[in-house]
């Protein structure tokens, strides 16, 4: 462990980092696993995303097998002028590449099934300006498992909005990725400290298996 990280843990200990745990009913939300992040020639390519996609395949299979609600998100903007991207695209114009080539296509192995909801979004958070929160609420969901990319962008923003909407936010660390380990680890630290629980993928798999037998807690 790096000295700075150890110092941060010491500084936060006893102040931040309370565990919230899993609730009674969960949804798996797969955020923006698009080929823009996995194709090396794409300007959004991120080294940490392909491994996160591979790790998520098993999690997705388990969710489907155990009857867990699965929701995917994708980024969609107005092709002519990107007016629906607002200031976000002025700050991050690279996101416009999502409409090029096949960059908005879902990554292999984590594609939505016909019966799974795909939420389209224009900003970082999966909750902002979308139907995600009311959809989850109407389904009786109290726990949101966030996977996808990027850790420092859409995962972080969705974690913050998730807890602000009253959901228990769980992030399996193997199933999120970024373009650099520094921002990736820093944002996992912040999420775990203030907005949700960052856990091992195996903890989520065990929770899904318990959910099948009616005992998720």
Image (cartoon, helix red, strand yellow):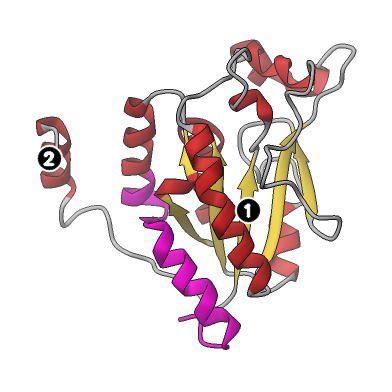
Report the residue marked by disc 2. 6
Residue in the image at 20% along x and 54% along y: 15
Residue 84, given in percent of the width and then of the height, sits at: 80, 23
Residue 100, given in percent of the width and then of the height, sits at: 78, 16
> Quadrant location of residue 44?
top right
Residue in the image at 50% along x and 48% along y: 55
Q: Which mark is residue 188?
A: none
Q: Which region is colored magenta?
A: 191-217
Secondary structure beneath disc 2?
Answer: helix
Q: Residue furthest right?
A: 80
Q: Which mark is residue 29?
A: 1
Magenta-colored stretch includes residue 216: yes
Q: Is residue 176 visible?
A: yes
Residue 144, given in percent of the width and then of the height, sits at: 56, 60
State whether residue 134 is above or below residue 125. below
**C-alpha distance separating marks 1 and 2:** 31 Å
Residue in the image at 48% along x and 38% along y: 51
Magenta-colored stretch includes residue 113: no
Question: Mark 1 or mark 2: which comes first in sequence?
Answer: 2
Q: Is residue 165 visible?
A: no
Nearer to us in this view, 99 or 123: 99
Residue 181, given in percent of the width and then of the height, sits at: 35, 28
């Amino acid at each position: 462990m790096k000295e700075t990280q150890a110092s941060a843990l010491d500084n936060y200990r006893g102040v931040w980092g309370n565990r919230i745990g899993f609730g009674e009913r969960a949804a798996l939300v797969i955020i923006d696993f698009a080929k823009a992040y996995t194709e090396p020639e794409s300007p959004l390519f991120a080294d940490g995303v392909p491994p996160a996609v591979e790790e998520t395949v098993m999690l997705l299979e388990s969710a489907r097998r155990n009857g867990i609600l699965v929701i995917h998100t994708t980024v969609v903007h107005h092709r002519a002028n990107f007016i629906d991207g607002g200031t976000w695209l002025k700050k991050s114009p690279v996101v416009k590449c999502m409409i090029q080539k096949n960059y908005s296509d879902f990554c292999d192995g984590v594609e939505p099934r016909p019966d799974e909801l795909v939420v389209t979004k224009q900003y970082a958070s999966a909750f902002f300006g979308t139907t995600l929160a009311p959809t989850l609420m109407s389904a009786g969901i109290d726990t949101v498992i966030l996977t996808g990319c990027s850790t420092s962008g859409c995962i972080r923003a969705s974690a913050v909005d998730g807890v602000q909407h009253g959901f228990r936010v769980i992030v399996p660390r193997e199933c999120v990725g970024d373009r650099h380990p520094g921002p990736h680890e820093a944002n996992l630290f912040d999420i775990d400290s203030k907005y949700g629980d960052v856990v091992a993928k195996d903890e989520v798999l065990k929770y899904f298996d318990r959910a099948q037998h009616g005992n998720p807690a």
